[in-house]
């Protein structure tokens, strides 16, 4: 099969759909991979790296879409790309169709087969192609939070690991899911005292089993939250209610009870945030301050580390991509029910029921 990997053109998106390691695996199976020139530069891969792995380079995005039977990318196509998508072309990406009726209708019109990374599920209902980005978005907030705790950027002036004779910083993690556990792990690795809260006892039991003793679990309720926000220096918001807006675990009035210079990293910003005062920010202008509390809530945190994010993404997407190119989408989806859940649009029709519901089309 002929696979095309276009450059990501969304502002500040430096990831790409396939690393040279992925190209090599497809090349070994006698598939042809065409990469748009310069597509890998943001993630640290040159055209030469891709050529060495067996890819061919095309200058223009139009040529990539024109030649490819399958497109592999990261973000959903933006408006001016809609017309480039061809009938029967397989397009694999994070589509998030439920958030855009316009994109959904454009993909109907294209006649393409749309495979959305975010709806592929494993046996436990876990989303294996979303997990690596949550892992990145769980580890990054500690790096960012440690930086914004420094005084010159309005933080409290606390070193997370402390020093001999001075107690370490205190990190409060809301949510013990993928993001929360990665955050707790990184913070504890730096030597910080960590409190992690959830409403799910199974998650808390797991954390209690696997984490060192300076990571303490607490059930998440208003009383406990009000108590802990007064004494913790860095707060990570990683709460998720599947398919719903995140609840306001920290409300506006609570900010006044926190110490000046406390830092909140709102990772759940894409679902509205679990702190009432969270609003999306960008890598260029990542923070704002309310009641002396520093808020960091960049909506695409993994975009800050495109090398790690691209490699982590290709590691998990490649096995599915290989099935699709070796077998064709029909046979591959018949054989693998997990991959089949990624099918969102076929023959100009939605085949993923929840998207119908999101648009009120039933
Ligand atoms: P997850 O489902 O693995 O974990 C969420 C946890 O929140 C669950 O354990 C759940 O029980 C818990 N929870 C629910 N209500 C709670 C409450 N009131 N108090 C405490 N805990 C509560 O989700 P995840 O993969 O860890 O993702 C967390 C959030 O991070 C999501 O909104 C996700 O979209 C977001 N995210 C953001 C970025 C970014 O760049 N900003 C990147 C990846 C993920």
Image (cartoon, rainbow, N blue to C red):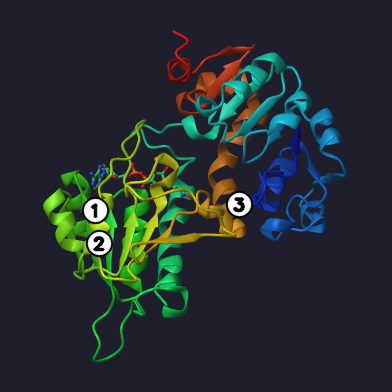
For label 3, the crowd category at 10 Å Cα-Cα, with few meaning under 14, some 14 to 19 and many 20 or more, is many
Q: Which of marks 3 and 2 is nearer the N terminus?
A: 2
Residue occupying the point 54% across, 21% down: 344
For label 1, the crowd category at 10 Å Cα-Cα, with few meaning under 14, some 14 to 19 and many 20 or more, is few
The kind of secondary structure element at disc 3 is helix
The N terminus is located in which quarter? top right
- Judging depth in this view, the residue of 73 and 328 nearest the camera is 73
Q: Which of marks 3 and 1 is nearer the N terminus?
A: 1
Residue occupying the point 43% across, 70% down: 148
- Residues at discs 1 and 2 in contact (Cβ within 8 Å): yes
Residue 256 — which label? 2
Percent position of residue 295, x then y: 40, 59
Vertical position of residue 172 compared to residue 199: above or below: below
Q: Is residue 175 visible?
A: no
Tell me the quarter of the picture where residue 218 sits. Answer: bottom left
The kind of secondary structure element at disc 1 is helix
Residue occupying the point 39% across, 47% down: 268
Residue 310 — which label? 3
Q: Can residue 355 be seen in this view?
A: yes
Percent position of residue 105, x then y: 63, 17
Residue under label 1: 253
What is the C-alpha distance between the residues marked 3 and 1? Answer: 39 Å
Vertical position of residue 4 compared to residue 48: above or below: above
For residue 250, side relative to residue 72 (left or right) = left
- Judging depth in this view, the residue of 343 and 8 nearest the camera is 8
Percent position of residue 329, x then y: 62, 22
User: Quick check: which quadrant has ligand 1?
Assistant: top left
Percent position of residue 177, x then y: 31, 48
Residue occupying the point 50% across, 53% down: 298
């Amino acid at each position: 099969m002929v696979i095309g990997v276009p450059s990501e053109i969304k502002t500040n998106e430096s990831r790409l759909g396939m690393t040279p390691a992925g190209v090599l695996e497809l090349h070994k199976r006698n598939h042809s991979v065409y990469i748009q020139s310069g597509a890998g530069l943001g993630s640290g891969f040159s055209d030469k790296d891709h050529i060495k792995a067996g890819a061919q380079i095309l200058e223009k995005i139009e040529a990539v879409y024109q030649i490819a039977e399958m497109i592999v990318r990261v973000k959903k196509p933006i408006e001016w790309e809609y017309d480039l998508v061809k009938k029967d072309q397989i397009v694999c990406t994070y589509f998030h169709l439920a958030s855009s009726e316009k994109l959904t209708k454009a993909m109907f019109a294209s006649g393409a087969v749309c495979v959305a990374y975010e709806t592929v599920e494993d046996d436990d209902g876990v989303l294996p192609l979303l997990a690596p980005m949550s892992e990145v978005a769980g580890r990054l907030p500690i790096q960012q939070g440690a930086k914004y705790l420094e005084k010159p950027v309005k933080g409290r002036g606390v070193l997370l690991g402390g020093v001999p004779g001075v107690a370490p910083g205190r990190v409060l993690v809301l949510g013990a899911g993928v993001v929360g556990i990665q955050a707790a792990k990184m913070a504890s690795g730096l030597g910080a005292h960590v409190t992690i809260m959830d409403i799910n006892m199974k998650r808390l039991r797991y954390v209690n089993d696997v984490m060192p003793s300076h990571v303490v679990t607490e059930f998440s309720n208003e009383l406990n939250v009000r108590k802990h926000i007064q004494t913790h220096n860095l707060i990570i918001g990683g709460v998720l209610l599947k398919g719903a807006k995140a609840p306001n675990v920290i409300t506006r009035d609570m900010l006044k009870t926190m110490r000046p210079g406390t830092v909140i990293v709102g990772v759940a910003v894409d679902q509205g945030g679990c702190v009432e005062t969270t609003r999306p920010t960008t890598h260029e202008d990542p923070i704002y301050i309310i009641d002396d509390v520093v808020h960091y809530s960049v909506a695409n945190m993994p975009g800050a580390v495109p090398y790690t994010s691209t490699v982590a993404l290709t590691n998990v997407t490649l096995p599915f991509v290989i099935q699709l190119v070796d077998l064709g989408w029909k046979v591959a989806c018949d054989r693998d029910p997990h991959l089949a859940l990624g099918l969102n649009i076929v023959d100009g029709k939605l085949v993923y029921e929840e998207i119908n519901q999101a648009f009120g089309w039933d």
